Amino acid sequence: MITYEFRKSKLSRLHTNHEVVRVKRGLDGPAPEERPTPDGRRNKQGIRIDPEVEAKHEPRRTVISALVTHEPGVLSDVSGLFSRRQFNIESLTVGPTEDDERARITVVVEEPDPGIDQIKKQLRKLVPVISVRELEPDAMRRELALVKVTADEPAQVNAVADMYDATTVDSSPETATFEITGSRQKIEAAIETFGQFGVREISRTGTTALARGTEDTAAPVSATESAADGANQDGTYTQTADDD
Amino acid sequence: MSERAAKITPADSEEEADDQITDSAAPDAATEVDEDADTTSAPTPVTTGAESVVRALENAGVEYAFGVQGGAIMPVYDALYDSDITHVTMAHEQGASHAADAYGIVSGEPGVCLATSGPGATNLVTGIADADMDSDPMVALTGQVPTEFVGNDAFQETDTTGVTTPVTKDNTFSSDPDRVGSDVSEAFALAREGRPGPTLVDLPKDVTKAETDREPDAPKTPDTYHVQERADSEIVADAAERIENADRPVMLLGGGVIKGEASEACREFAIEHEIPVITTMPGIGSFPEDHELSMEMAGMHGTGYANMAITHCDTMLAIGTRFDDRLTGGIETFAPDAEVIHVDIDPAEISKNIHADYPLVGDAETVVGQLSEAVETSPAAKKWRVQCQQWKSDYSMAYDAPEDRPVQPEFVVEALDEATADDTIVTTGVGQHQMWACQYWTYTEPRTWVSSHGLGTMGYGLPAAIGARLAADDDQDVVCIDGDGSFLMTLQGLSVAVRENLDITVAVLNNEYIGMVRQWQDAFFEGRHSASNYNWMPEFDKLAEAFGAAGFRIDEYDDVADTIEEALDYDGPSVIDVHIDPQANVYPMVPSGGDNGQFALEDDHL
């Protein structure tokens, strides 16, 4: 049994016959500059810091894979989430999986660690999202690009294509279009090299990725695991991942 | 309410319908219906999508629905005609969503609102966004143009699921007559499970009109939706140890404490371990404000003592709060010495704004129970408690009420509080009056404070009072403390209150200003009152009478007590137009992004 101790009601100063206690509105107590202030500080992410040695979280690029139910509106739910929460995304790809009822969304984001953490948690909150994982730096990541170049010098163009294992998709007297797959860096290097002949148009798919070996990329997890995974983040983060 | 037509079962389809229930309806759903129904007779089998929608509402135990008719939602309303659900026709769809929101706050069960497609749906959006920000359980049902016209810019077509995606917990475009009832059931389950929130089901007219014999499934969340009830026991043990060793502990109770029915557990915990308690604005009512451990509300217009305590604590047990910027002020200076134990059912709130040193994901009541078991000795914090009491006297909320000035708003709020019972429900609009209602009403019970916190929706008060009135016990008073600007935004709701004879008392703290904006202009815009000065307001007492409500007016201190008594005694809606001091400002105040410990007590401090 709990007994409450009530302090004198603040209504005690309210009298009938309007004999109101005459105190000015909130003039009691020391003014702001006379009050003690704590020594500590927090950073912008709300983490307590030593003001002398504030560790800054620099943005890093990472790949997040989400397994979602394959239904209309999921892509717009996910892309809408990124735009309204101002998360920086570099690419977003979506496609069917081995299970007809599920699709996989692969997002490449560039955010500081607390932001990446929020992205994962917010994605998990979307009802059609089954599971979310940030991939390890050693995950397999590939992108496909179609590059249409001016083919005035076919031999030299072909030599560059061979260097990057590019496949010819289309050729005309003036142009050649190549399909290049690989890491982001490889595709960027190829585009740069093709640049000497004149690149007319480029279309890129964005990164898609899978975890290596027997590890699941983003498999359904139990309620306990998923929530604990989200909560047990303790302010220490992994090192910035190398891209491929 | 008007008499409902008796339930009609078309004789020619009765036999067929009986077959259907045994043949095709899920046996579980049929059992569920039998258990929940008040009547002894078996419910009439559904024949259309719309009937399935209404059956889903009935199965969920819905008593009231708030809405406005319209073309695309007509089949649902037609099905509602034969239902025991009481529909309250609102004057505007915004009012319907606010009423449903308030109904959800007071009852703890999702409030239901209905609107037609296009403008009906977009008018609901403000109330849906409000419920989303405050995590209030709500189900919104919107009509939609027939499926074949969707995407053609048909009459009254709006991409409702598109518009509401950012402001709902989940929404669904229901395209299958056999699934439409189950979609509504699922929306119910999602609205109330875990962290509550608004859900929406968009109902194309052809789908609700279509024939179906499918009874809705029982309310169930999708398999992809997980809620963690118990927190990680290792972190609980660490957090308990931290509490035991705290020198300057506080509990910070948010709206999640009330939604999670954890108020009693938190009270017991705080009193047993003698920990001072601060609440957020949505957390008002989770702890009795007349208890000596109560520091009341912290934040921008929180009490000085709450802001001192929150700034200087070394251990913060924060439960069911999302650390909104109006609470924290500047992040850098928020409780900078405190190790934070954060209890929340939503993992995404952990370390979103304030880093949690002890993240405890789980149901508030369950986790507080876990902590109660784990904490063996109370913290030795006598000195701290003495300090907190000292702050309470240093920064008392006393105010001046000179007789040669117009009536001070604080006095009116206190007089209303004094004239009503402890379990009285207070609803408000947004602005200065809302802050005075926070500061000067002494709340002692959960679910008695009904306000628009996160979204800050002016005009929330009156429709919320309508929803709260229908959710409240008959002997509970419902008082709406409103501002003149807020009241003007939704006062058409008075027509509803009069028609339904709802006993609510509206006190309009009338200063003929958008007062909070005026206060900020004085503080930060060199007193340039751009578009904040109404100069003229209708006579709200007369306006109330025109609606058929009782109207009262207060100009002087002498009128306050008697007029309030009279208005409260009136059996039906009453409006008191209280002409308060137009220069009155809300203090203490922490400027936006400021240091809570440096709250201003007067204009000169800003």
Image (cartoon, grey):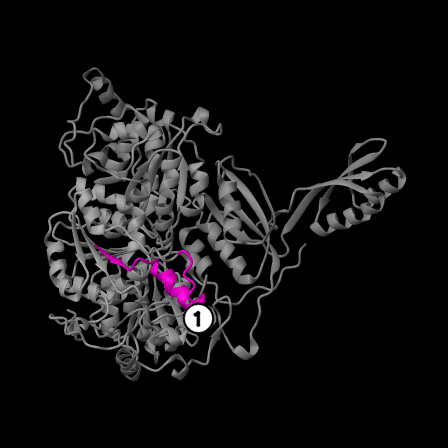
In this rendering, is residue B62 above or below A230?
above
User: Would you say A44 lies left or right of B155 here?
Assistant: right
Residue B507 picture location, percent across and down = 21, 56
Q: Nearer the viewer, residue B246 or B369?
A: B246
- Report the residue at 66% width, 59% height from top: A242
Residue B584 lies in quadrant: bottom left
Position in image of residue B198 (x %, y %): 35, 46
For the residue pair A145 and A208, the one nearer the viewer reads as A145
Task: Say which quadrant the C terminus of chain A sits in.
Answer: bottom right
User: Is residue B375 found left or right of B564 in the rendered image?
Assistant: right
Quarter of the image where one finds residue B123: top left
Q: Quadrant of residue B176?
A: top left
| Neighbours of disc 1 within 10 Å: few (<14), some (14-19), many (20+) | many
- In the image, residue B595 sits, relative to residue B541, either above or below, namely below
| Callout 1 amino acid | Gly
Q: Quadrant of the N terminus of chain A?
A: bottom left
Percent of width and height locating residue B544: 20, 47
The residue at which mark 1 appears reads as B594
Element type where label 1 sits in the image: loop
Q: Is residue A214 left or right of residue B186?
A: right
| Magenta region includes residue B511 | yes
Residue B527 is left or right of residue B220, and the answer is right
Residue placed most toward the observer, A17 or B86: A17
Asked whether the viewer can see residue B398, the reply is yes
Asked whether residue B366 is drawn in magenta, I would say no
Q: What is the span of residues highlighted in magenta in the rendered image?
A: B507-531
Residue under the image location 37 percent in, 56 percent down: B454
Q: Is residue B199 above or below residue B327?
A: above
Numbered disc 1: what chain?
Answer: B
